[in-house]
Every structure is written in structure tokens, then in C-alpha cells.
Image (cartoon, helix red, strand yellow):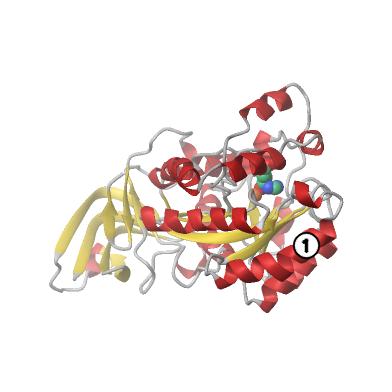
């Protein structure tokens, strides 16, 4: 059953970069793209349906490749403290921060976590996000990490989205392991990860490489375990200080290293050589009032793919709109609108290892796209917030939003 989508312009992202076709059309067959080109060249065929997109600009479905959407409670009180001058690191050192979300997440039932996460993920979906990555990392023991990962799988069953789950057990030290961080890492590597993976709950492995979390040596131990389980790797690196986590990630052929404000030229070169994607998180940069910028020019000079993501989490980026993050990526990091669009489609797909099926509109790829009621694609980056009128198509079917 083939559908013809006509009367549109398409930002295809074909050939590995921003590219577009004006006066375009697309043919989908089931869940996939069968043909894409200019309207004059539409193949003569028997279409089960012809859909008029009224001159809309079509982009690939947006991909939010770094989120912590599942968590108990929220940290608005901590937000107020930070406004009074207490730093994120000071709050973490006094038992707040990630630890407070761990307490709230442990107390919450699977159903409660699912209900609260769905509200947030629906906001992203309505904003045009059709693929999302969600991390665990607020459970920090087997039962609670498992609970989070099961909720992530349930989100995939509930919403018309592609959902990837990442195990971030090495996010912070749980209270049971105070002063025994090596022992916690051993527990992750010997017990938690192998079991969670065996239960089919893990698509990738992440860690927080930072002076207030885990050292590069501890992260490497987690990477070795991930490698032995054949699981792809990602890393929170160089967010608050420079520890060379992004170089370490590159050495292990990580899909991505994320945050990166404090990365060095050496780190950039290592990531370029490995093809590791730089995922920049302007929401966390803004919300923490960071003043050190990720080295945009150097990343671009060395040809590192740059993705942008919401980092949706209760502590550093309670961001419910990827479009707002796109505007911040342009305004704060000076990415052009075209680079910004590639950052949340093509490059975000690479950051999840989904580049063969997602992230651009070309024959054979999944038919996930958004038809935006706008005059020019840069408007997707330009408007701040609000509900930009759009139609969302996932796996060849229009979804109601
Ligand atoms: O990506 N950097 C570590 N993890 C999250 C923050 C988590 C939290 O504060 O709850 C981040 O910014
Ligand atoms: Fe994060």
C-alpha cells in the first residue's frame, strides 16, 4: 500500500548533510520511504492514498539523543538555591542534586514513574520528536535501575516513537557504597549490567566521567564490560572539568561524548579520528549559567559531527522542547539553522547508531517526518517556544497530536 505525500518542500538531509528539494513529493510504502524527489517526477503508480501537505516544509522526525526523561519528583527547590548563588557541585556535595532524585525515584512505583515520564515525553513528541533516547541512572541499584529501564520500554509501547534505552548506572555513587566507588563500579560490571542486558533492557551504556562522579579509570572499567557485552558506548564528559573522558570515549569507539564544555584540542582530534559524535546540550549550559563554551570552531574544523539534545533531566535541564534547544544551539553556540537542523536529525541518528534507518529522508529509510506549516526551514530554529503548527508522521502514518 503506497501513499503519495505531495505539495511540499523537503529538507531531506540526504548525502550526509543539510540538503533540500523544493516542490517535492514523497512516496511511502508501509513504514518506509519508497521514493523521494520533485513533484514533476512522481512515478506513475496506483496510490492507496494521496495526501496534500499544503505547501508545508517537511523535515525528518526530530531525534532527541540524550535525555533522562524518567525520574521521581523534581528539583525546583534546588533551582531556587542555585539562584541564590549555591553551585550545582556544592548542592551535590551536600547530599542534594542527583542523590535527591535517586531518593525520589527509588520511592516511586513503576506506574508512577511511567505516568510522570509520559507527560514529559508527550511534550517532546508534540514538538516534533519521533525518536528519543532515555537513560536510567536515578536508581543506582539493580532493582531500581531495572525499574527505570522497564519504564523506558513501556514508553516505547505507549507512544508512537522510536525509543532507545541507555543504562547509566555509573551516574553517581549510591548511598550504600559511600567511600567505595570502586566496589560500586565492580557491582555494575559484574552484576547489574550483564543481568540488565540479558533481560533485553539495554541498548547502550553511558557513564558520568567527572570529579564529582567517576574517574576515567572507573569509566574505562565500565566500557570494557560494555564492549564484552557488545553494547555501544556513550559518555557524559568534560561538563564541569577536563578529565579526558571524551578522548577515552573515542578510544573505545563511543557513539558519542556529550556536554564537552571543558574538552581540549586533543580530545577533539581523538573524537574526529574515531567518528564519535559531539552531543552539545545547550539547556544544561544555560540552566547552570555556564560561561565556558564547548570549542565549536575546533569541532567544526576537525569535522566532528555535532548533535544537539535536550538533556531533559530534573537537575540541569528541565527542557520540554527540543525546538527551544535548537534555538539555544544557534543563539548560544552560533550553529547556523542548517547545522542546527542536521544536529537534531542526521547527527543525532549517528549518536544513537541509527544512521542507517533514521535521521534523513531517503529511499529505504523509515518514514518518520514532520510537515511544518512554515515559510522556510530556519523558522523551526527561529521561533521561541509555543506550539508550531505541524503534522507528524511516524512509520508512514500520521499521528494525532
Ligand atoms: O546530563 N551530568 C550528569 N547528568 C545530568 C544531570 C543529572 C542531574 O542533575 O539530575 C546531565 O546534566
Ligand atoms: Fe545528561
Name, please, the residue furthest toward the top.
Answer: 84
Task: Residue 332: name its quadrant.
Answer: top right
Residue at image position (62%, 60%) is 167
Tell me what residue is drawn at x 43 percent, y 53 percent.
155
According to the image, label 1 marks what residue? Answer: 185
Residue that lies at the very extreme toward the right in this rendered image: 179
Which quadrant: the N terminus? Answer: bottom left
Image side of residue 396 versus residue 122, left or right: left
Q: Is residue 11 left or right of residue 77?
A: left
- Residue drawn 84% across the image and 49% down it: 211
Mark 1 burial class by Cα count in 10 Å: few <14, some 14-19, many 20+: many
Q: Residue at x 52, y 54 (%)?
A: 344
Task: Please state which of residues 250 and 122 is positioned toward the viewer in this rendering.
Answer: 122
Quadrant housing residue 343: bottom right
Locate residue 228 relative to residue 373 in the image: left or right.
Answer: right
Q: Position of residue 358 (x, y in %)?
A: 45, 65
Q: Position of residue 94 (x, y in %)?
A: 81, 34
Amino acid at each position: 500500500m503506497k501513499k503519495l505525500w505531495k505539495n511540499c518542500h523537503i529538507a531531506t538531509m540526504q548525502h550526509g548533510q543539510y540538503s533540500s528539494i523544493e516542490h517535492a513529493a514523497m512516496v511511502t510504502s508501509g513504514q518506509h520511504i519508497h521514493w523521494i524527489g520533485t513533484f514533476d517526477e512522481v512515478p506513475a503508480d496506483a496510490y492507496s492514498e494521496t495526501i496534500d501537505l499544503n505547501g508545508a516544509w517537511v523535515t525528518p522526525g526530530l531525534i532527541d539523543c540524550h535525555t533522562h526523561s524518567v525520574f521521581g519528583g523534581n528539583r525546583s527547590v534546588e533551582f531556587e538555591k542555585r539562584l541564590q548563588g549555591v553551585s550545582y557541585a556544592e548542592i551535590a556535595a551536600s547530599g542534594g542534586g542527583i542523590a535527591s532524585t535517586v531518593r525520589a525515584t527509588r520511592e516511586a512505583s513503576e506506574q508512577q514513574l511511567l505516568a510522570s515520564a509520559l507527560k514529559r515525553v508527550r511534550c517532546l513528541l508534540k514538538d516534533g520528536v519521533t525518536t528519543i533516547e532515555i537513560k536510567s541512572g536515578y536508581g543506582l541499584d539493580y532493582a531500581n535501575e531495572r525499574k527505570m529501564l522497564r519504564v523506558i520500554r513501556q514508553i516505547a509501547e505507549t507512544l508512537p516513537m522510536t525509543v532507545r534505552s541507555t543504562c547509566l548506572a555509573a551516574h553517581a555513587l549510591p548511598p550504600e557504597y559511600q567511600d567505595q566507588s570502586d566496589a560500586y563500579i565492580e557491582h555494575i560490571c559484574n552484576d547489574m549490567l550483564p543481568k540488565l542486558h540479558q533481560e533485553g533492557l539495554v541498548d547502550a551504556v553511558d557513564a558520568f566521567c567527572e570529579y564529582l562522579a567517576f574517574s576515567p579509570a572507573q569509566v574505562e572499567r565500565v566500557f570494557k564490560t560494555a564492549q564484552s557485552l557488545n553494547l555501544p558506548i556513550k559518555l557524559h564528559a568534560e561538563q564541569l572539568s577536563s578529565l579526558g573522558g571524551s578522548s577515552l570515549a573515542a578510544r573505545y569507539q563511543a557513539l558519542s561524548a556529550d556536554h564537552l564544555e571543558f574538552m581540549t584540542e586533543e580530545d577533539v582530534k581523538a573524537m574526529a579520528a574515531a567518528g564519535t559524535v559531539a552531543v552539545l546540550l545547550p539547556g544544561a549550559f544555560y540552566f547552570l549559567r555556564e560561561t565556558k563554551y564547548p570549542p565549536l570552531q575546533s569541532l567544526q574544523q576537525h569535522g566532528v559531527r555535532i548533535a544537539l539534545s535536550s538533556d531533559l533531566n530534573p537537575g540541569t535541564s528541565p527542557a520540554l522542547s527540543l525546538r527551544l534547544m535548537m534555538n539555544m544551539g544557534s543563539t548560544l553556540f552560533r550553529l547556523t539553522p542548517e547545522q542546527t537542523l542536521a544536529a537534531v536529525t542526521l547527527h543525532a541518528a549517528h549518536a544513537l547508531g541509527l544512521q542507517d534507518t533514521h535521521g534523513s529522508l531517503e529511499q529505504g529509510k523509515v518514514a518518520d517526518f514532520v510537515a511544518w506549516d512554515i515559510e522556510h526551514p530556519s523558522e523551526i530554529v527561529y521561533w521561541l517556544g509555543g506550539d508550531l503548527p505541524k503534522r507528524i508522521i511516524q512509520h508512514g502514518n500520521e499521528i494525532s497530536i
